[in-house]
Amino acid sequence: MKRKLVGALLSVAMVASLAAGCGSGSKEAAAPAESETEAPAEEDAEAPAEDAGEEAAPASGGGGELIGVSMPTQDLQRWNQDGTNMKAELEAAGYTVELQFASNDIATQVSQIETMISDGCKLLVIASIDGDSLGTVLAQAKENNIQVIAYDRLIMNSDAVSYYATFDNYLVGQKQGEYIVDALDLENQDGPFNMEIVTGDPGDNNVNFFYGGAMDVLQPYIDAGKLVVPSGQIAKDDVATANWATETAQSRFENILSSYYSDGTQLDVVLASNDSTALGVANALAANYTGTYPVLTGQDCDIANVKNMLADKQSMSIFKDTRTLASKVVIMVDAIMKGEEAPVNDTETYDNGTGVIPSFLCEPVFADKSNYKELLVDSGYYTEADLQ
Ligand code: BGC
């Protein structure tokens, strides 16, 4: 118990420290180098001094074994937090950590994982860039008896994946769709309301669930003519955003605005699957749209987007507390390292092409400007100063 508390405190301190850097306007300034490996002990200076002795002793399974943590990129805020939390929590549990960020480049991620294998990692935790591109390197992991936990994004078509830990991705999309139904009062209003859709990278399996969850809610209203999509871009491939990049979402949205809304047509709602794409939409709206501001969804509660929510430039987001996910993964790592089965709560939803991968799904939480303080500030995720 006490050990978990120490881990949690350390994690909060690390996140608070990272978030403080983000709040100063430059997340890069606070983030570790793109090719970060295991940090020397003194870099964990945020841990309270009295915990230092505790940290030296392994929490449970950890006996200094090397765990490889592969994250997709440092370009988006959340992966910095995921990486930092995972490293802090694993170290607090007595493991040594090799943490790498792959600059959203598949070849870089493959070669970083190869290095983790040759460095003697006992287990790999991987948030993939492209879920379909790791089969060969993970076959190598399997040959070396290294188990793999897919982190946040499912790794497809590889039988080397033992477990999956994520948030309930379908629920994320469903909450976004339900928010739109409520915001436009679609049960009672006929509209028609004009909607546009922006989702994420086609190589990210989560997109199927975000888009699928939202469209399962919204499609009946499209079929009933209450929601219309003037651009005609509705199919998943037509609304994708490579690498979830803000700039890509922005330029696609600028085109949509100039082609379908420049005559004064009102845009009522934008379903954006996450915050990096919602930011692109908000940027495009700021420069190219003068009608009544549309309902705009998001996901992640990135600092820039919480600021936009407070300024009425984004309606909602979904909070996925990366501290919770990291803690769950550490529990899974511990179990696996002891030769036990890891705890899961879903054995049906996530088939990666080789069979269903036992999963632990954390709960995503609705966020808007009415509850951000309790969710994000009171919980220590951000400080008020970060959000100014
Ligand atoms: C994650 C989202 C994130 C997106 C872009 C998805 O796989 O689940 O939280 O916004 O990737 O990084």
Image: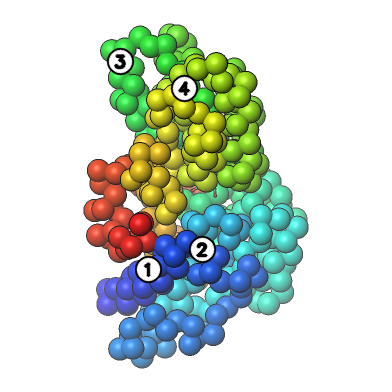
User: Residue, x 42% and y 33% (percent of image)?
Assistant: 296
User: Residue, x 25% and y 43% (percent of image)?
Assistant: 370
Count residues near mark 3 (Cα–Cα under 10 Å), then give few for <14, some for 14-19, many for 20+: few
Q: How many marks?
A: 4
Q: Which residue bears the numbered disc 3?
A: 187
Residue 126 versus residue 191 in the image, above or below: below
Amino acid identity at mark 4: Leu
Label 1 CB less than 8 angstroms from ligand 1:
no
Residue 274, image x, y percentages? 48, 42
C-alpha span from label 2 to label 4: 32 Å
**Looking at the image, is mark 3 or mark 2 earlier in the sequence?**
2
Q: Nearer the viewer, mark 3 or mark 2?
A: 2
User: Residue, x 40% and y 25% (percent of image)?
Assistant: 292
Label 4 CB less than 8 angstroms from ligand 1:
no
Element at badge 1?
A: helix
Residue closest to the eye, 341 or 292: 292
Scheme by which the image is coloured: rainbow
Residue 282, image x, y percentages? 49, 38
**Looking at the image, is mark 1 or mark 3 earlier in the sequence?**
1
Q: Which residue bears the numbered disc 4?
A: 267
Q: Which residue bears the numbered disc 2?
A: 26
C-alpha span from label 1 to label 3: 41 Å
Element at badge 4?
A: loop
Amino acid identity at mark 2: Ser
**Looking at the image, is mark 1 or mark 2 earlier in the sequence?**
1
Q: Quadrant of the C terminus?
A: bottom left
Q: Evaluate if marks 2 and 4 touch, with contact meaning CB atoms under 8 Å apart.
A: no
User: Residue, x 49% and y 83% (percent of image)?
Assistant: 43
**Looking at the image, is mark 3 or mark 4 earlier in the sequence?**
3
Residue closest to the eye, 170 or 309: 309
Q: Which residue bears the numbered disc 1?
A: 16
- Asked whether residue 9 is in view, the answer is yes
